[in-house]
Image (tube, helix red, strand yellow):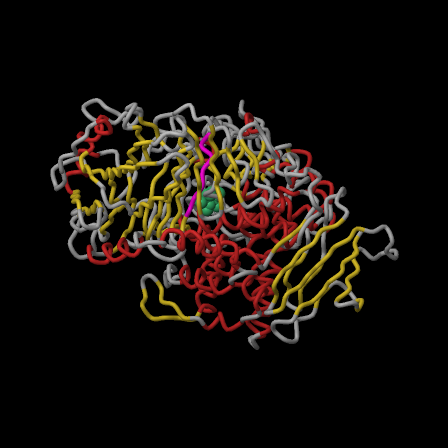
Amino acid sequence: MDRAPSPDPNGFDPAREAANRYGRFSPDGSEYWITDPATPRPWVNVIANPRVGLVVSQTGSGFSWIDNSQLAVITRWQQDLVSDASGKFLYLRDAASGEAWSLSPAPTWPAFELYRCRHGLGYTTFETVHRGVAAQWTLFVDARETVEYWRVELRNLGDRPRSLELTGFLEWNMGVAPSPRREFTRLFLENSFDRELRAVFARNHMWEVPSQRWGHWNTEFPYVAAIGCSEPLVTALGDKGEFLGRHGDLRAPAALSRIEWQPDFGRHGDPIAALRAPVLLAPGELREFGFALAVGTSEPATRDLLGAALAPGAIDRALDGVRAAWRERLAAHRVVTTEPTLDFLTNDWLRYQAIAARLWGRCGYYQQSGAYGYRDQLQDSQVWLTIEPERCREQINLHAAHQFADGSVYHWWHPLTEQGHVTRMTDDLLWLAFVTASYIKETGRFDVLDDVTPFVDDPQPEPLREHVGRAFNRVLKRTGPRGIPYIGAGDWNDGLSAVGLEEHGESFWLAQFFAGLLADWAEIHRRVGEGSRGADLAACRDLLVGAVNQHGWDGGWYLRATLDDGSPLGSRSNRFGRIYLNAQTWAVLHDVAPPERAAACMAAVREHLVTGAGALLLAPAYAEPAREIGYITRYAPGLRENGGVYSHAATWAIAAACKVRDAELVALLLTAINPALKDPDRYWAEPYVMPGNVDGPDSPHFGRGGWTWYTGSAAWLHRIVTQWVLGVRPEWDGLRIDPCLPPGWPGARMTRPWRGATYRISIERTGDLPDGVRTEVTLDGVRLDGTLLPFPAVPGEQHDVRVRCR
Ligand code: GLC
């Protein structure tokens, strides 16, 4: 899938790599290179495997966790996007001059002669040159083990020998974070130094979570962590006061210049780990070092992990392993379009973001969650569908097991403690049906319906079809006299938290969403020989569609909801929030709107909601809190759901534009939402991942992005670019080829697995199609009648698909 060679002999093409004053993509897009650390906000990487992870910004600030990025945070960190200088660091000290500096900008802010931070898929590397020493510090986690590595390379660039000291530093958190009551929590922490293993161990005798058996806060933190160094001559410190000195700080820790370090470990300090190794470098000499942070469930387990991680060659093997794992994971599904940064996002960063930050880490710099959102990670798991669909199935089963016997579900729950949040949100439970239908369309594996899982409050396992059935019944029960489901304490939009607390307020969006699911599940039941259940669901859908069109049309667009007192939300009669995006886009996506209404409501979207920053969630923003609507009205105007571009919903607008075949709108929205095409001084956020939100026009900072990484928009944008813009979409009877390319694109290409075969699809725009034909598809040289690719006959086969479209 190579593209034409770049005109620059060095392979550098600033336009293609979206260079800006802070950084740019690497030529193949798989790394983002930051060359000026003074980015307007932290530009971070979220590095994770299914169990451990870390966040690291371009300054070096960040932290590490295991299994839950809120309840089981290993190292201490302060969320401070302005100073961005807290966490775990490496120092280098010149023994002759006494000068000490960090191997990342924070926390000592050296005037580096060279600085580059390379965020890659699964690793971040800081490359610096200072005082004649070139350093590379790479942070990553093992592809499988619960081990974080720091790989360090130091090279003496000068012509005299150098005597240096390399010191690794972190503060132990070992439990729930954020943890503002350090004077309390540290009373339960313990650290120790193992001279033989050259490692500092840490444990916590009290974990601030309820324990089933022993009551409140009366349980041991179930992990032991240790950080060790590959160098034999390591000395260590364990107390923060000893390391920093009274009134000292991370810019100039007092202990760095002290020759003797007295052991200060135990249960009575403020526990940190500082490990110092002497480094002698001859002129030109290059040396490598490794640090490993291992976390196990017992001291022997952690010791074993650390021993293996510090063995000769282990760190390089682990780094090769993690890079290969990401490459292979993402390799099977690739695209080439006219916009290189869209390719970088689609091929690497969106799925990396969804997997590392959403599914595995459940964490970003703006939000440490650790919990599974019922609707959230189900939607995220769509990224597995084309590459490792069984992982999507695992996610489906995990969520099915977090449903109650009455069909309702946790809004979110915490793995490790299984604490969950019961709410009166009304859509969560339906996403199980949504993602299951997507899984079946992609894989043809109807047997997923027979996967059995228990309910939270009933240990009797039931098949998935029963779980979905109970969710449907619950929604049908929670439907008002006009045939529209109640909104309760919110649907998809968490902030509509008071609209229907009395169970009168209705949700037109929920009705539209449900209508699409009923169509899919009518088909699923028909195909597994449950025709009468299928017919019931189809009839239900018809009623719902009728009710939405009867009661939900506001003249020019669809209402979003009604409040408990019956008054409309998202209506031209409202002062604020006159039009909501989701009630238009899903009317289109789920075929609820008849053609003339689809055209009208999308025209209204264009008129009232489309901006150069993407489609707004609603307009105009609420300028004052409205208790009867909910906390959405309490955000500052233009921020997040209150009239901002909420990226998750903004991606749906792209799909809806494709569906009504408004290619110009597709082009506009696709460009508007692309973080790599922004002016970073205005936009602020990372150019290589999706933000949760961008300020809308009612904010003085219109166009400013925030809440990056931890957003459902990453998985969705990937799905929409591949399935709607390039138009390659699994349907019940085959793979639909229905592109809606932006007007300027001459074509596009995609390689994609489908049902065990590989499809190489090349799309070409042409003016030369017969009247009435929009798309013409040729499969292995044979012209198809229509645009649906049949199922492959033999697994492993390869197919060439040529598409000509208008
Ligand atoms: C947050 C929630 C998500 C919700 C969205 C819109 O991202 O995690 O579940 O759909 O906000 O309110």
Q: In which quarter of the image is residue 783?
A: bottom right
Q: Where is residue 588 in the image (x, y as percent from the top left)?
A: 65, 50
Q: Where is residue 782 in the image (x, y as percent from the top left)?
A: 79, 69
Q: In which quarter of the image is residue 612?
A: top right
Residue closer to the observer: 567 or 298: 298
Q: Where is residue 683 in the image (x, y as percent from the top left)?
A: 55, 29
How many numbered discs sit on the rendered protein? 0
Residue closer to the observer: 649 or 166: 166
Relative to residue 739, is residue 230 drawn left or right? left
Relative to residue 23, is residue 785 drawn left or right? right
Q: In which quarter of the image is residue 96?
A: top left
Please report the residue visible at 49 percent of the width from the left and 70 percent of the height from the top.
Answer: 448
Please report the residue visible at 43 percent of the width from the left and 26 percent of the height from the top.
Answer: 112
Q: Is residue 742 at least partly visible in the picture?
A: yes
Q: For the N terminus, which image quadrant?
A: bottom right
Which residue occupies the extreme bottom position in the image?
A: 529
Q: What stretch is highlighted in magenta?
A: 41-47
Please report the residue visible at 75 percent of the width from the left and 45 percent of the height from the top.
Answer: 745
The vertical placement of 407 against 181, above or below, is: below
Q: Position of residue 470 (x, y in %)?
A: 44, 64
Residue closer to the observer: 767 or 608: 767
